[in-house]
Image: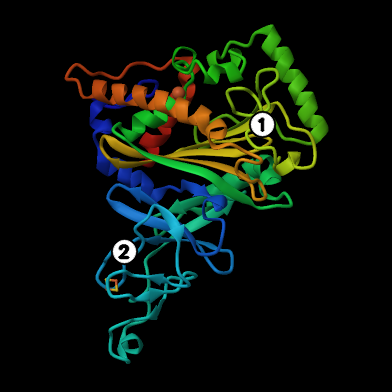
Amino acid sequence: MTYQSGYGFPAEVLGDAARMQRLFDNKWFFVGMRADVARPRDYFKFKLFDEEYFLVHGQEGQIKCYVNRCAHQSARLVNAETGRCAARIICPNHQWAFDVNDGSLAHASQMPDDFVKNCPEGELSLTSIVVREVSSMLFACLGDDSDHGEMDRMENLITPYTDPFAKAGHGFKQAYHSREIINANWLLVMINNRECCHCDMNHKGLVKLFDPSSFNGDMTPEYKAMIEQAQSRWDAKGLHWKEMPFAPDENFRIARYPMAEGFKSITFDGELASQKLIGPFENGEPDEGTLSLWLNPNCWVHFTSDHIATNWVLPLGQDRCALYTSWIVHEDAVENTHYDKDHMTEVWNVTNAEDVGLCKSMSEGAKSRHYKPGPFSQNERFCTQFCDWYMENSV
Ligand code: FES
Ligand SMILES: [Fe+2]
């Protein structure tokens, strides 16, 4: 069966892990935020199929990404999911030491004195992956020939919305992080994220945070009035709100939404998740709204007055992927003084668990010998956009 726009993926596409790999070989993808590696020498490991990589914060502030393999005999360099390197990255095998800033070999323990000098230049360096930073969000590209033009365009369009968070007078820190291996097809996880038709019935907690109109697509007069009121408020504060939906050839959607009345943050009780406000709200009042960003191929990020929640997914195999979630707060926010772990993380922990159940179910269904892709409605137009975009960019 061949792919047809407006329908889900045929089984052949869902099962084509090599095609997924081709996409990631050629497109920029989200790998977290600067706050995930906030201090020099902090590292953060992630995995794409069988390959491990890690981000590391260099001594001069630059964020680097290396393949998690030693240039000597390919031993794993960092073992923990997150941590802090020594002054250099030391391989546990023969203790070769690599410079955090550029991956070059600084010292080859156990080797003759002239060994480093006699090796061809570059042969002893770690393999690095190109990283770009947009409003503190980090993107990696595996391809040698990374298309900066596409990133330049996205950066120009989204930074008026996102830079006020990144360029405020403070840094951020990761308050919490979770990573979960999901036994589901990565493509189906992304499709699940791109529609809200399942939300009413499956996210009974999350939907209370928003007017139902923002989920089902039908604009009630009450919601229209609510949006217009919020937009006047945002205009007065100089906050960009105009939605840029996924255009057919675009890899992102950004929108500012009002939350339900009385909700100041993405928490089940509507109270602030952190008492230290961030970005454009730092020295003012919290706003009853969220700035949300969805990016192809692999993430969704929500900015509220007090924290940033990032969710991103990478395939590990045909029916296995990893979901990474971080909660980012003001660098001066203190746990149990300004924020509480359970209160802050509850919405996404609960919502993601609900989605994981659905994604597993869909993945099992796609294995059925009776499986055939179903049609998407207008309310699922971002699923169609994702599928079309994937097919075009993974050849
Ligand atoms: S494998 Fe890393 S130092 Fe030998
Ligand atoms: Fe969902």
| Label 2: element kind | loop
Direction from residue 27 to residue 370 in the image, left or right: left
Ligand 2: does it lie within 8 Å of the C-beta at label 1? no
- Nearer the observer, disc 1 or disc 2? 1
Direction from residue 268 to residue 313 in the image, left or right: left
**Does the rendering let one see residue 247?**
no
Q: Residues within 10 Å of mark 2 (few under 14, many from 20)?
A: some
Q: Residues within 10 Å of mark 1 (few under 14, many from 20)?
A: many
Residue 100 horizontal/vertical position (percent): 47, 69
Direction from residue 238 to residue 379 in the image, left or right: left
Extreme front residue here? Answer: 336
Looking at numbered disc 1 in the image, what kind of residue is underneath it? Leu
Residue 313 horizontal/vertical position (percent): 41, 39
Looking at numbered disc 2 in the image, what kind of residue is underneath it? Arg
Along the line of sight, the residue nearer the viewer: 5 or 11: 11
* Residue highlighted by disc 2: 69
Task: Look at the picture and state if 209 lies above or below 91.
Answer: above
Instruction: Locate the N terminus and report the quarter of the image it occupies.
Output: top left
| Label 1: element kind | loop
The residue depicted at 76 percent of the width and 30 percent of the height is: 234
The residue depicted at 33 percent of the width and 16 percent of the height is: 374
* Residue highlighted by disc 1: 272
- When asked about the image quadrant of residue 303, the answer is top right
Residue 45 horizontal/vertical position (percent): 40, 53
Task: Look at the picture and state if 124 lies above or below 260.
Answer: below
